[in-house]
Amino acid sequence: MRTSDPRSPTSVWHHRYAKLVAACTVLLIAAGASVTSTDSGLSVPDWPTTYGWNMFAFPLSKMVGGIRYEHTHRLIASTVGFLTIILAVWTWRIESRRWVRWLGVACLGAVILQGVLGGITVLFFLPPAVSIGHAGLAQIFFCLTVTLALVTSPGWRAATESVDDPMLRRIATAATALIYTQILIGATMRHNAAGLVIPDFPWSFGHAIPPMWDPRIAVNFAHRVGALVVTLAIVATSSHVLYHHRGRRELVRPAVLLLAFVAIQVTLGAFVIWSRRDVVINTLHVVNGAAVLGTSLVLALRSWRGSVVPEFRGSGVPVPNRAGSATGSAASKPTPVEARP
Amino acid sequence: MSRSFKALAAVCAVAAMTACGSDSSKSAKPSSPAAAPDAKKVDAATASTITGKVVLDGTAPAPTPIRTDSDPACAEGNKDGLKSESFVVDNGGLENVFVYIKDGLGNKYIFDTPTDPVKLDQKGCHYTPHVVGIRVTQPLQIINSDNTMHNVHGRPEANREFNFGQMVAGMKNDVTFTVPEVLIPFKCDVHAWMYAYVGVVDNPYFAVTGNGGKFELKTIPPGTYTIEAVHEKLGHQSQQVTLGEKDSKEITFTFKAPSQ
């Protein structure tokens, strides 16, 4: 039965479940990153079987060396796949908002495509284009699960104030797009074994700009420049929030978190080079990259809420706000950007 | 049940179907030059020999100890430790260098291709030998002598890439290569330290340097040849050698040690 009450037990548990799927997706990204960090993507040569076994029947005693990373990645991926099927069906059955129902379907479609890409890249010996696509779609899928978890939250559904700040929308969206682009560049570098082609940091062969060029050096340097651009975009976005929306916790929290995550990310990136691609650091760099993207997405979505996200534009269902009064299409009165004295 | 829910169910069905993939078979087309109509066998009575040595100029990097504890079977088989084999130097001579006639034979001679397989063994979680030579279309037999699983991942560029598993001790698989290629890296992705290199050539004149970096190429017909030496890390060098009848030449290749 579909419900529009975000505080009903069904809605609350559905939201918690969506958060669980998003958290498991982070775990899945970590497992995938550990596979590439240990260069063990082909340690299981077959797919969807594992050395001829049904993957769920593969003996634990045989999970040695690179198999441990690759097979664990497959098991977690299958688990997330099953969790996503449940999420999509559950969302379809209980969610009153049509676009959220289809968001659940998009999650399912993305995870299916992701599994197929994972299989193809193994069977064709990790062609960079497919592996980069696999890495890029992983982040898209993560973003979809984060979005679903966000829009099913009581806070999202009960909020009464939209954010009428076109500038924030623009810079938060641009920052999110830049972060995703930076992740794609990072994946291109990773899947072309170009992570250490520039061996020093912060310099490049002892210079500010590499004195020699080839495609791998170019993509490595692009990732470094991208890090600078993304950091500036995040600082601009977070500063804007802290300056103009200091009183709005739902914006301040992701803005502060974003600053913390990007600082950690740049530090991890430096240590990836200084440690000569230490497996743990390299893996954490990918996972934290997803955290940067997810947090930026949350901030961007909250900035758009009430503008194109149809919560305030009259889905026909009044949504109780925090104080308990009903809000609906008539409640979409925008709040002006707070002016600092 | 709504139409949209049916669509969702269809998507789930596709999810189940996509789990049923299958591996594709592999084959490669031969492209070695054919022998000329008047091609003949090499006359052993007038054949010559090239002997030589590959020298490393400088200090070789110290062999890196390899941690094998990610697989208990590998750790058990290497209690004395396992070290990288990229730079094995004996009395200044560099071992594991593949030396062969790269050019000069043309299509004037016919060479029988051996049908006996060349063996590449996985024993103690490393490949034995580390570098091996083989003829085009001659079988390369890959053996698992370890009480653990290996995957055999050949990464040629001119030939067809392959990757298969050997789950238990005693498994053997034959592979062949259809075009010359020097050197083809072999890798075990289960045990990331395991590498071997295979030189595939279309003539019988090849060797891998052994003790003291020495090599010998025998029964070569008179002529002028390009001899190439290839090392997995240091790249390749070549020399021209002219041989008369019943001739014997000695050559030396010198590779510069990498900076440390």
Image (cartoon, coloured by chain):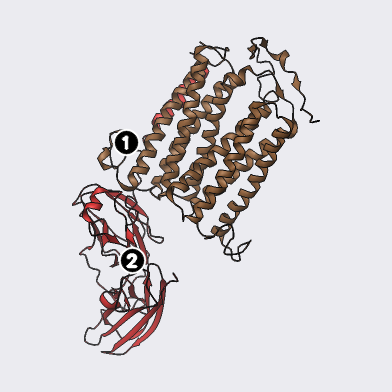
Residue at x-position 20% and y-position 64%: B116
Residue B33 circle label? none
The residue labelled by disc 2 is B63
Q: Residues within 10 Å of mark 2 (few under 14, many from 20)?
A: few
Q: Is residue B103 visible?
A: no
In front: A255, or A179? Answer: A255
Among the chains pictured, the one given brown colouring is A
Q: Disc 2 residue type?
A: Pro
The answer to whether residue A257 is left or right of residue B19 is: right
Quarter of the view holding residue A308: top right
> Are the two marked residues, 2 and 1, in contact with CB atoms closer than 8 angstroms?
no
Residue visible at 29% across and 83% down in the picture: B50
Residue A55: mark in rendering = 1
| Dot 1 amino acid type | Met
Rendering coords of residue A235 (x, y %):
67, 41
Q: Chain of mark 1?
A: A
Chain B rendered in what hue?
red
Q: Secondary structure at mark 2?
A: loop
User: Which chain is disc 2 placed on?
Assistant: B
Between the C-alphas of marks 2 and 1, the distance is 38 Å
Quarter holding residue A230: top right
